[in-house]
Image: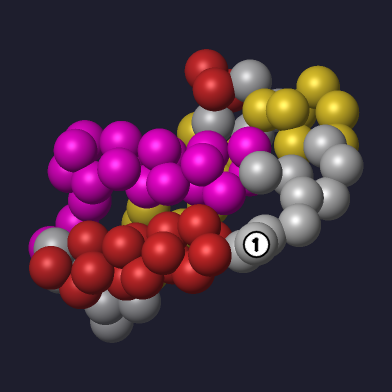
Amino acid sequence: MRNAKRGVERIKKVILQDRTGAPDNVINVLKSDVFEVLDGFFEVNPQSVVAEVLVDNVGMYEIKFTARAFRVRGIRNSG
């Protein structure tokens, strides 16, 4: 769960720094972070992770992620 919190904070920072859109490097960072979080719960195919960031006319972001997983992992205990 610690990875998830770290990933969310990193995503917030990246999006707030780039108010004009989402260049490829931002998309790649988002995909990497989402993969890291999902991989804690599923056996995810890394090539299947797709991220799309859209900005509407009032500056609101629509963020979409898709990924394909082979199976659910067992729950990991932190600590």
Residue 54 location (% of width, % of height): 36, 57
The residue at the point 36 percent across, 70 percent down is: 9
Between 49 and 57, the residue placed more toward the observer is: 49
Answer with left or right where residue 4 lies relative to residue 73: left
Give the main secondary structure, helix, strand or loop, of the magenta stretch. Answer: helix
Q: Quadrant of the N terminus?
A: bottom right
Tag 1: amino acid: Gly
Between 50 and 73, the residue placed more toward the observer is: 73
Q: Quadrant of the C terminus?
A: bottom right
Verify whether residue 69 appears in magenta.
no
The residue lying furthest to the front in this view is 79
Q: Which residues are magenta?
A: 20-39
Residue 62 location (% of width, % of height): 45, 64
Q: Helix, strand, or loop for circle 1? A: loop
Residue 29 location (% of width, % of height): 30, 43
Residue to which mark 1 is pinned: 79
Q: Is residue 56 visible?
A: no
Answer with left or right where residue 70 lies relative to residue 10: right
Residue 66 location (% of width, % of height): 62, 39
The residue at the point 23 percent across, 46 percent down is: 26
